[in-house]
Amino acid sequence: MKRVEKRSITIKDVAKRAGVAHSTVSLVMNEREHVSPKLRERILKIAAEMGYQPNMLARSLISKKSSTVAVVFPENPHFFTITYFLMLIEGIQNACKKYDRVLMFFSLDQTKGESYYQISRKWLIDLMVIINIDYTRDISRDIQDLKNNNICFSVITKYRGKEKVNSVSVDNFEGVRLALEYLISQGHRRVGYISGNPNSSDGPERLRAFKTLSKQLNLEQDEELIVYGDFTFESGEREMPKLLDLKKRPTAVFAASDYMAIGAMRTIKARGLSIPKDIALIGFDNTLEAAYVEPGLTTIRQPLQEMGERAVDLAIQSMREPEAGPQTLVLKPEFIKRQSC
């Protein structure tokens, strides 16, 4: 029998070797029903032996759907330099390999009225992971459009809308509790707080947790101890002087992100103060930078890679089992002790 070169192998070649119709092979390759598990396994084994590789572009054109995982994030020129996002993407990429899907990135420019649903239509997207939702506008209609048109998606944050959606987030309340209980164990009672972006989900939730737990744990209650950043290095550096200039400054500062904590660290050092001798410092996230600043930043770890991977898992599950309904996953944080407190 004439040997078929790997580069020219098609579904028909696999079907001929398996002794089935090429439509049966197509059902298997597209993960459709109506094929027995035993036959499916045999066809997949034959396809692997022959070196068959599906033409993803052709599949998309025929089905009007892509074989991609679309990662959509708000317009941000620094997105690919922020290790917080890169750690999420690592998990998403791991899941893409697991499901044999291609990873694509799309920035959402809300100032131009762009929507998640428009992106899905323009690029034939059927599976989407939404990162870092910006709540400066109401996105409920956009989310409903995705659901109404069977676009399977998940969000990596605690979703603030009323709709039920797949979401993966960290337990912010528990993370704040871990940080404050440790500071209390070190003798701190006057703790400053640098809050995060109010237009996010995590920013307001961590702020509420800080206020609630500060009261429950009998920390000093002083509105001046709370300043407002936006999760960036710059905002931590900008807001820290407000705490240092208080008549009675805090003995410790808890920042709602590592980046703000590192920005605050720069200001503290510029004032000639020692960390943690003069003022202790804790961050949130456990980004890559936290371990390499001096002193090493004590922080609350989010399982970012796992969050990315689980987000894809949920979207894929919605595609395969639409009757199951959306799921909410809240993962546990972890206290990471370093030298800053």
Image (cartoon, rainbow, N blue to C red):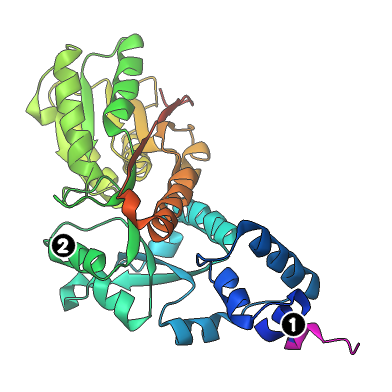
Q: How many marks?
A: 2
> In this rendering, does residue 332 appear at all?
yes
Amino acid at pointer 2: Ile
Mark 2 secondary-structure assignment: loop
Q: Is residue 112 magenta?
A: no
Q: Residue at x 53, y 40 (%)?
A: 292
On the image, the x and y values in percent for residue 175 come to 33, 29
* CA separation in Å, label 1 and label 2: 50 Å
Q: Quadrant of residue 99?
A: bottom right
Amino acid at the residue labelled 1: Lys
* Magenta region, residue range: 1-8
Numbered circle sitting on residue 278: none
Report which residue position mark 2 lands on. Answer: 139
Of all residues shown, which one is farthest toward the left?
A: 223
Counting from the top left corner in percent of width and height, residue 126 is at 38, 70
Which is more toward the observer, 102 or 45?
45
Q: Which residue is mark 1?
A: 16
Residue 95 % position (x, y): 53, 55
Q: Quadrant of the N terminus?
A: bottom right
Res. 269 visible in picture? no
Which one is closest to the eye, mark 1 or mark 2? 1
Q: Foreground residue, 103 or 173?
A: 103
Q: Earlier in the sequence, mark 1 or mark 2?
A: 1
Query: Who is closer to the viewer here, 188 or 162?
Result: 162
Determine crowd level at label 2: few under 14, some 14-19, many 20+ residues with C-alpha closer than 10 A: some
